[in-house]
Amino acid sequence: MVAKINAVHFDISEHLESFIHKKIDRLYRRFDFISEAEVTLKVVKPEAAMNKEAGIKLHVPATPELFASKTCDTFEEAVDLSIEALERQLEKIKEKK
């Protein structure tokens, strides 16, 4: 599976990048029909709390794209919550198959 990470207007740390890859890999192990994942990270308002946004788009063959986006205090928390939302969407797809 291919996982693309796009950080909008900032450089991503190695720690954050490895955290995201670990989460995406775990998701792929549970749902092996995922073909590609795109993660977009951006800072919404630099001076405010709850300003880190993570959006994750999954490409699954023969289904519409799955997408989840969450805004939190940290990118790690936003990625975790987005992954949880995508897991629920993937469970529904798995039940239909």
Image (cartoon, rainbow, N blue to C red):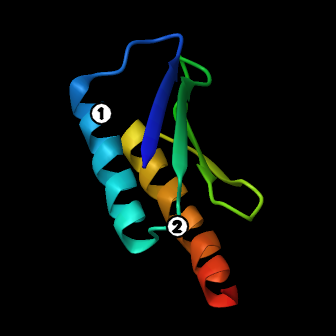
> For the residue carrying disc 2, how many other residues have a C-alpha within 10 Å: few (<14), some (14-19), or many (20+)?
some
Q: Which residue is mark 2?
A: 33
Provide the secondary structure element on which disc 2 rests.
Answer: loop
- Identify which residue, 13 or 91, lies in the foreground: 91
> In the rendered image of this protein, does residue 97 appear above or below residue 23?
below
Q: Is residue 28 left or right of residue 84?
A: left
Q: Residue furthest front?
A: 62
- Identify which residue, 35 or 26, lies in the foreground: 35
> In the rendered image of this protein, does residue 19 appear above or below residue 87?
above
Q: Residue furthest right?
A: 64
**The C terminus lies in quadrant:** bottom right
Q: Give me the residue at 32% from left, 62% from top.
A: 26
Which mark is on residue 42? none
Q: Is residue 12 left or right of residue 34?
A: left
Q: Position of residue 95 (x, y in %)?
A: 63, 89
Provide the secondary structure element on which disc 1 rests.
Answer: helix
Q: Give me the residue at 41% from left, 49% from top.
A: 77
Mark pair 1, 2: CA separation: 25 Å
Q: Is residue 64 left or right of residue 37?
A: right
Q: Is residue 74 visible?
A: no
Q: Give me the residue at 49% from left, 58% from top.
A: 83
Q: Which residue is mark 1?
A: 16
Q: Residue furthest left?
A: 15
First of labels 1, 2 by sequence position: 1
Q: Give me the residue at 72% from left, 54% from top.
A: 65
Q: Position of residue 1 (x, y in %)?
A: 42, 49
The amino acid pointed to by label 2 is Phe
